[in-house]
Image (cartoon, rainbow, N blue to C red):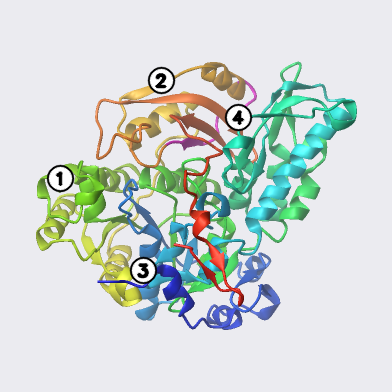
Amino acid sequence: MSFKSDIEIAQEASPKLIQEIAAKLSVDEDYLECYGKYKGKIDYNILSKLEDKKPGKLILVTAINPTPAGEGKTTTTVGLGDALSRLGKKTMIALREPSLGPVFGVKGGAAGGGYAQVIPMEDINLHFTGDIHAVTTANNLIAALLDNHIHQGNSLGIDVRRVIWKRCLDMNDRQLRFMVNGLGGKANGTPREDGFDISVASEIMAVLCLSNDLEDLKERVARIILAYTYEGKPVTVGDLKGQGAVAALLKDALKPNLVQTLEHTPAFVHGGPFANIAHGCNSVMATKIALKLADYVVTEAGFGADLGAEKFLDIKCRLSGLKPDAVVIVATARALKLHGGVPKAEIAKENIPALEKGIENLLKHVENITGVFGLPAVVAINRFPTDTEAELKYIEDRCRELNVKAILSEVWAKGGEGGIALAEEVLRVIERQESNFRFCYDLNLSIKEKIEAIATRIYGADGVDYIGNTQKQIEEIEALGYGNLPICVAKTQYSLSDDMTKLGRPKGFRITVRNIKPSIGAGFIVAITGDIMTMPGLPKTPAAEMIDVDKTGRISGLF
């Protein structure tokens, strides 16, 4: 049996003009900036106009730890939004932006799939409206100002051995991880060690996502720590007087991008890829505007609930005042069997014993959402044709033990129609179950205590080990008065542990922290664990080799 590819489905769609999508939300054309026919930006000044309007209900979609089998988190988000629209609810979707570099040639999961996608698919997965390129430019402007200051006399006394700001590029390129620049004599700058991150790992991306307005963005940029002086004092963007220019570069990027689903539900796609490196959630600006424009907002956080959802709740909600009314946790029988030790080639076969083992991953995430964070939850089983009735019933029965309903979702194949049952259960949960939202940890705890809370309560670790220079890094950050910030853990997305090979619900492990980095502009402390890289490399056969465009401009090869 053959299926149409995502790009084929998207290219056969009949999108409405973006003005029509904006009109659904009662957005005046004064606040809509069109980028061609089918995408636009909403001016953030609309928040002033909507100040007195009661916000809608917020639904967070998250998932089990991802596997090569796929979970369908964004597909479920889009399908749920379309289903709510079919039920007559004024609905918006708020998604992360796919990043060009890490997904080049691959239709990023951040855009959905099948008959539950956001469109125009090619634009969203490639250059889109240029937000990530603005982040790249802003990041590298700061790097240029820093090196120019050093070249022009270094009046601040910056120790070139203690520069922590990296350049960035929205492209995977391992050649740029570690390098030396400024060679070739005095006219070419001051030689120093440097390196590149991917753009979505930049603190600028986190600042963009967590800023409440343009002034807030400017203030956050000014606080970014770039380096340290010979006396050990931090040097910020504000010290280089660069925050105004950076804000000017990001002025339009801060405006959320408006697109639509295949069924014409309005959707914001704005900022936030990669919860295993940075923040991993769409922007506060997009979420807040959506809540003012719609009665129900379906949003998502990157990767599994141990990463994206934890950061959404402990960082984004804490810094913005947002509070979800319900959480949907996405899983598939196929992925749970992988977590149970079944090779990918055999996941289509019924295997209840493997499911029994793998489902512990799902149940841990359910326990975290309901027990740790106190939020009502629904499990969405993203159905595949190879799933058996026995497998689906087993998942439903085990979820019921935790007083959570598991609902079959068929949005990939049927669009919004396949998500009606899920939408009805989400509405029931919002109406009948009280949200007792609380954070995983108190901000007044020490940095180590907060990391310990995340590791033990969310991951199920026995404790945390610190290697290398981390103890000194923590002491320096706390001495500077930043110890009361939330923690952003950089960890593999594939496991609850920091070892990607430990699937399911591992026991008897510890988390190893190898680097602590202050992201003061973003408003959190980054704890890097395991082998996380902020500049990945390309595989032996890059997916980009499959991309082509014909003489009419029609793109192929995105998948």
Image quadrant occupied by the N terminus: bottom left
Disc 1 marks a residue whose amino acid type is Ala
User: Where does the magenta region start and end?
Assistant: 479-491
Q: Which residue is mark 4?
A: 482
Above or below, comparing residue 378 to residue 443 in the picture = below
Please tell me whether residue 488 belongs to the stretch shown in magenta.
Answer: yes
Label 3 crowding class (10 Å Cα cut-off): few <14, some 14-19, many 20+? many
Disc 1 on helix, strand or loop? helix
Mark closest to the chain's N terminus, 4 or 3 = 3
Tell me how far mark 2 sits from mark 4, CA to CA.
21 Å
Confirm whether residue 446 shows in the render.
no
Q: Residue at horizontal 29%, vertical 48%?
A: 370
Disc 4 marks a residue whose amino acid type is Tyr
Disc 4 vs disc 3: which is toward the camera?
3
The reply to whether callout 1 and callout 4 are in contact (CB within 8 Å) is no
Q: Which residue is mark 3?
A: 80
Label 4 crowding class (10 Å Cα cut-off): few <14, some 14-19, many 20+? some
The reply to whether callout 2 and callout 4 are in contact (CB within 8 Å) is no
Disc 2 marks a residue whose amino acid type is Asp
Percent position (x, y) of residue 57?
43, 65
